[in-house]
Amino acid sequence: MGDWVYLALLFAPLFLYTTAFRVAGILVKDDEAGIWRVAGLLNSDLMFALGYAVFWVGVFAVFRSGLPRIAAAVLLHVSAALIAVISTIAYGYLETTGTTLDYSVVTYYLATPTEATGAVSSESSLLVWALLAGAALYMLFGPPLLYFALSRRGGSPEAESHGPEPSGAGRSGMTRRRFIAAGAGAGAGFILFRESLFPPSAAGKGGVVSRSPVSNLIATGIEEGEMAEAASRVPDAADLSRLKLIATPRTRKRHVALIHLESTRYHSTTPYNKDLGTMPYLAELSKNSLLAERAYTTTPHTSKAVTSLHSGLYPHPDTDIIESRPGGIPARSLPTLLGEHGYKSAWFQSATEAFEDRRVHVRNFGYDHFAAFEDMDTTGYQMSNYLGYEDDIMLPPSREWLTENADSPTFVMYLGVTPHHEYRLIDRYGTKKFARGSANAMLDRYLNNVHYDDFWTRNIIEQYKELGIYEDTIFIVYGDHGEAFGEHGVKGHDGVPYEEGLRVPFVVHDPQSFDGGVVLREPIQLTDLPPTIADMLGFAVEGGEYPGDSFMRPLSEDRVLRFSCRPDLVSMARIEGFEKYIYHFGKQPEEFYDLRRDPMETRNLAGGEGGGKLATLREDLLEWHAKSAAAYEKGAERTA
């Protein structure tokens, strides 16, 4: 009887605690879910809880005393505390991002814990931290203390549990019973636990939370291994390691400036939303520029997006920033290629150099000069978020560098960070009320920081004018990815396969071209920039073929664009013409939209499409995922 009391003192609070967070998480994804809907989504949790309990009952039946019993009890308490911690963190992650805590996220942040510090500290409440600490402490120490208190008050249940063996039960009989108990507990626990890993697909918005947190970690770990295996079997993968730019009679050595608008979604800027005055300067500039009406990132994460922008490759789909490892990009990127023709290159960023090993990442691109905010004078500048300072901080060092190097053609990256989460309000140029109401306070701060970057963009271009090199410079003003504020139940950008996460502003301003403005209506992607820049500068490309196309040449409206999200195995998307397909790796139903009629993706048409068509689109994305990973894996093999 004592064992049952002891285990109940642990299992009951653990089940109630984890279930409370799971219900709260389900309601985060679907606040209109009824009791039966919530109960259906708890199937995985029930299977996991039963499997966990049955397993440990079997263990306690086998190890009844001595050191094995003590070791079993310690493992039980540690595992229970770990489950409580995972459940709490999974809820916090879901509430913040709208996506589940997957295996790749945990392994990435365990390997690089400082990467999560800013985001976690800016979003986590003291209540959640208190609950996490209290739950972990109880799971570690609460049951034995309560059990001891109950034993002291009402007699010792231990005596009942550890009384003399029944008559006729010798050592071999007890061993046999223990063996049977262990086998039954392990078998039943395994069967129940396996059921928790792959519950029936749940329809509707809450389907993404159909697995218990621990089951989801294990299941996504298994799925990640399967995807890696698929990548290893890909026979052909893009090889851009031998690319060269060849001078032609059209070649003109000019300056190129990349102006990186961090976390800026297309419809939060004035050129794409004339009713919103966030970027009037960019709107005016675009009247004598090339404006890409439908421009897209590749993966809505900065380090991944800039990899496409510089190399022409799709980024590695893995959650880890493979591209920031030494030699991690299996392509000759634009700074390297242009450097062979006398270009000087520099990368300036208002963010810290420490985040995602940015210095190594930039070295992989082949830049000559790198400067993060640690290399700059921060006096008089405001911090815009946990990553760094307001973007104007780059202006003095970039002016100094350009003054020294403008006699040569230059290739310069200005990577801003001001509109990034946590959206601290920067008031250098004043503030406006773009979004009203307390519920929109965060969105209003974000839009004000987008507005700030309109001034910053103007300041960069004015700097080139003051230095006398404006007329001979091609300016690329682009968003690396968008930002979501719950439009489709997700927030931020990493796990957002919808237009607010993938579609970005994109303006090419060349004082020597585009008089009167040009609107490019065909869809383009960041992978198109390297061949486009080579084309605009008059270089021919040899030694390989870019996956993207120069948009200075005719493009097809029906070209296919593909996207992955981070963490890996959350979702992928595919756009062909105006048809958009989203695959969530079985976590929630597939989605299919007609962007021409439904640009905000409010009507999922997947139910009206034939299963064969959806299967074809799904297989296309899975094959592309494998090839994207293989390009990096096989590239590493070539350089090993």
Image (cartoon, rainbow, N blue to C red):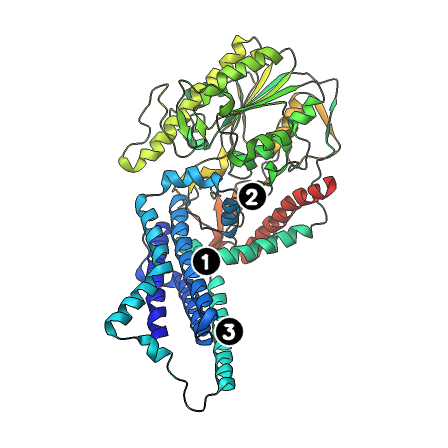
Residue under circle 3?
Answer: 187
Secondary structure of residue under mark 1? helix
Secondary structure of residue under mark 3? helix
Mark 3 surroundings within 10 Å by alpha-carbon count, few (fewer than 14), some (14 through 19), many (20 or more): some
Mark 3 residue type? Gly
Q: Is residue 427 left or right of residue 217?
A: left
Residue under circle 1?
Answer: 214
Viewer-nearest residue: 365 or 505: 365
Residue under circle 2?
Answer: 320
Mark 1 residue type? Val
Viewer-nearest residue: 125 or 315: 125
Q: Quadrant of the C terminus?
A: top right
Q: Are marks 2 and 1 in contact (CB under 8 Å)?
A: no
Where in the figure is residue 245, as x and y percent of width and height?
72, 26
Say if residue 1 shows up in the picture: no
Viewer-nearest residue: 557 or 540: 540
Mark toward the start of the polypeptide (1 vs 3): 3
User: Which residue is at 37% across, 40% downward?
Assistant: 123
Q: Is residue 177 left or right of residue 42?
A: right
Count the labels in the image.
3
Q: Are marks 1 and 3 in contact (CB under 8 Å)?
A: no
Where in the figure is residue 416, as x and y percent of width and height?
48, 26
Viewer-nearest residue: 94 or 155: 155
User: Which residue is at 50% across, 45% downward?
Assistant: 109
Q: CA distance from mark 2 to mark 1?
A: 21 Å
Mark toward the start of the polypeptide (2 vs 3): 3
Mark toward the start of the polypeptide (2 vs 1): 1
Instruction: Reply above or below: 51 against 169.
Output: above
